[in-house]
Image (cartoon, rainbow, N blue to C red):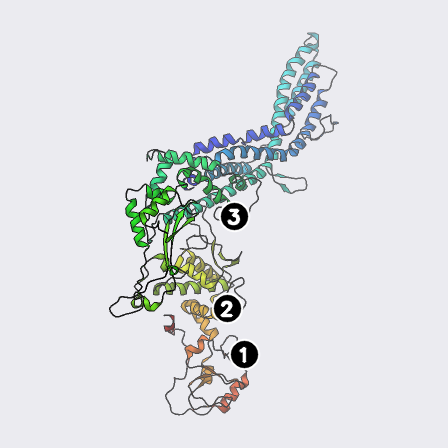
Amino acid sequence: MEKWVANDPSDLEIGKAMRDIGISQNSLFEIMDGAAGGLTQRLDVRVTQALNKLTNPRSNFLIDLDQIDQALGIANGASPDELGMNYVPLQLQGCRDQVLDIVEHKLWAWLQPTLIRWEAGPNYCARVLGKMISDMEHSLGSTNPPPPDSGPVRFQVQNMQELCADPMVRITHLNSRVRHDISVNIGIQLRGYIRKKIEFEKQRILRDYKAPNGTVQNGLLRDIIKTLNRVKFNLEHVATACRTHAELCQKEAARLDTVPRINGQILMVEGDGAKIYQRIVSQNGSLTELDAAQAAKAGWLLSQWSTLFDETAPVKAYFERAVTLSTADQTTLMRTAKDVFAEILHDDVLSLWADRPDAQAIAEKLAKGSKFFIETVNTLSPGDKKSFAVFPGADVDSDRVRQFRKMSGCDTKDWQAITSSSNFRASLLSELHQIALANTPGIVIQPGVQSLEAAEFNKWSTYSRLNPDGWQPISDSQLDGLQECKELLAVAIILDVIGVKMGNLICSNYPAVNFGQSTVRSLPNDLNKAARMWAIDKSDLNQLELTHLETTLKTSILNLKQNSELTPEGVVRRLRDNLSNSGTGMENWDPAAVSPLLRSFCMKDAELRQYYITFTSASASLQNTLWYVNGQSTVSGRRVEQSGYYCINPACGSFIGATKEEVEQNEWMCKRCSAIYSTEGCTYKPEWLDLVARTKTSQPQVYSTPIVTQPSAAEPEPHDFNRA
């Protein structure tokens, strides 16, 4: 995939390919002539008929010339002949669809064998089509030549008539000779005029032209360019999908080449797969022949990819494709590629084991590894112990199985032989059942015994233990990054910078670093899962990197702030207004849980911070009004036992918070009665303030939080100790 897609044609190859396709201007002229039903031949017959009359003094050749002009699209007063008025323009206009079909057929005839060539490919073909499109667009921009006319022919006819009427010509009996000689020149000029007029009409059909009603109509070249663009567009999508698939294959190959840690013996170590691949592909294992052998087999593999032509068909309309190959294509390619390695895919692990010189040692190692590691002090009954030997294939009595059972000691009646559909693993399993913990000194602490109960945690030893259920421990720096990702995603969702499409959270303006890369990134439609995938996994649902996601989202938000219609103040206002109705399509989206994320994001932004504080803080005088100290009474008559901020709603009087920071977390809102005391969106009533002024008792002499005189925009964030 990687090499095939990377093929780039040279200028010479592009020129040859364009000639092979055969849709140059001259080729199009020939195609149009053929599609119009032998246009030139019919006119040639009519010209011959007209020229035969030139030698007859009684015939009027100019009438025939007028009729030929009419057939070519030039109006005059003569009566049309059998060709009719505008014969040539109508014939050429009527064959547009047929010409397009022929062009598609020529393009398809070149594309089918070229696309699957190992030295060509989708990028190669797209480059050729791009050059053709460029040339055609340049041709559309050139100036049309002036239309030819029959004036020179008419002048020659008039000259012939004047000469034949000359008395000297008549006396010398040269009349017929003059007619013959001049008619030859007239025939040459007339045919040249007709050829140029037909070419002019073909040029007019090819290029955009103005209809009688004044509208500009697309020329035939414009329709051909659309066809070429559709094919080029699909080829570029195929190239992108193939590049992505190549990356996924490389990652999978690297994963498979990593030897896992198991309680047993891996027969293939790292690098063995590459050696076997080299041996089979190049047949004799020669490195010098590997490239040529790979190219030959890759070309054969591409020739089997029948659905590839559906992906690039000219008749396909524009549509958004996935960034990788379809499951059906991946399955077809993998199934076909496996045919190359058929000779080893039917081998099983016991065949590989039997060929090893240390087969006996491996069998003994496995037998030892399968023994019980739990010590028991009592004798187990036969029903409490079970042993299984699992072998590949359907025959547990084959020579290989008997050899392995004998060497490993699992050929006794205590071992039950089981067949498996997997060719690549043989297992020895022993099980103990119904063991009293008191009789297992290896588990329960006993004097002088090192037991499992006394074990201490010492990091995770293997990846399988590291991530058994999809979780893994993360560091403090990762935790900080996770919080920042969650904040940025939440703000982007509220501002509609990103949204849910087809069940996933989509960022559709991700920058493409290289040509053909996808500009779409997909994350789960759950805020916590999306933030974790971004911060920890650092790749999206399609295994595409997220290196530039932070810059992309921040740039989109910055563009909103710089928009003249949405100032930083407008951004904060929109965040607050949209919060309650945001998160369409998101799972587990809770505006109350998202609000602290919004607040944290705004407080970190120098421009948004001051407006957020203004919107969510109460005025200095109102803060003093809400502040009560121990011993005072609230408007509801309740005696204050803890200094802090209290609701001044006469029907409520509830405690709001002990400190300003605590109240700001709730944006100066009483949780009980939902009264809002912030500058923006306040719902308290003026009469409540009057009631406070009348009922608030004097403050006793106790230590208390100082009364607020003015809000501070530069107040630092309180440290969140609960995150740990």
Pick out the residue farthest to the top: 172
**Residue nearer the viewer, 517 or 297:** 297
Classify residue 719 as left or right of residue 557: left
Where does residue 197 sit, x and y in percent of width and height? Answer: 62, 28
Front position among marks 3 and 1: 3
Classify residue 549 as left or right of residue 403: right
| Badge 2 or badge 3: first in the primary sequence | 3
Pick out the residue farthest to the left: 448
Judging by the rendered image, the residue that carries numbered circle 3 is: 321
Front position among marks 2 and 1: 2
For residue 164, say whether it is visible. yes
| Badge 3 or badge 1: first in the primary sequence | 3
Mark 3: which amino acid?
A: Arg
- Above-or-below relation of 187 to 213: above
Mark 2: which amino acid?
A: Asp
For residue 9, say whether it is visible. no
